[in-house]
Amino acid sequence: MLKSNVLAAAAMVALAGCQQAGGKVDTAAIENQLKQAEARWNRAYAAHDGAALAGMYADDAVLANPGAPPVSGIDGIRKETAAFAADPKLQVKFASDRIRVAASGDLAYTRGHYTMTMTDPATNKPAHSRGSYLTVWQKQPDGEWKAIEDFVTPGPGPA
């Protein structure tokens, strides 16, 4: 009984962790959570961990990579990220330039830039690109933030 009360209290604290007194959403705390999530995402790319990459997405998410049709749903995203992570030449680094959190505290977005190296399927040589991304995040019932829309576009970005 004591254990379940402690767990219930911990869950309540975690769920309330992004609300300040008076029920106001602590957007700074949520921005920090999203920065931490993006840091985990970068580590998953560095580790070529397709499962961890897919774990960043909600079950009904959409992923749109450059030159490819959008992939909907976690099963398709798992397949996409596993193939992507298997490329031995893959190197991805990205960082947000802007984070905005909805007043409700359940939706947010990150927008930023990326650099990427991957194997060009036509030449089997490393291909370099850079560009921008926009990721829409939704707070899940367990309190974790997951991407629900992730759109990546090549183009000018920081050198």
Image: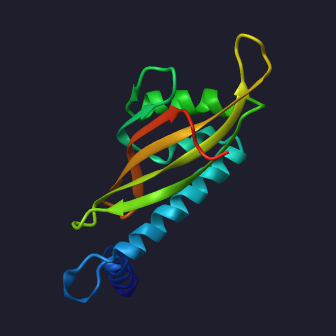
In the picture, which quadrant includes the C terminus? Answer: top right
- Does residue 41 lie above or below 50 as drawn? below
Residue at position x 60%, y 31% in the image: 82
Residue 74, quarter of the rendered image: top left
Q: Is residue 139 visible?
A: no
Is residue 55 in view from this perspective?
yes
Up/down of 110 relative to 32, above or below:
above
Q: Is residue 27 above or below residue 90?
A: below
Residue placed at 66% from the left, 53% from the top? 43
Name above or below for residue 14 compared with residue 84: below
List x then y, in percent, for residue 136.
36, 48
Q: Report the coloring of the rendering.
A: rainbow
The quarter of the picture where the N terminus appears is bottom left
103 or 23, nearer to the observer: 103
> On the picture, is 92 further left or further right than 100?
right
- Residue in front for this viewpoint, 11 or 33: 33
Q: Residue at x 55, y 33 (%)?
A: 155
Q: Is residue 106 left or right of residue 109?
A: left
Q: Position of residue 58 (x, y in %)?
A: 38, 45
> Considering depth in this image, is 35 or 4 the residue closer to the camera?
35
Q: Residue at x 63, y 51 (%)?
A: 42
Q: Quadrant of residue 14?
A: bottom left
Toward the top, the furthest residue is 122
Q: How many marks?
A: 0
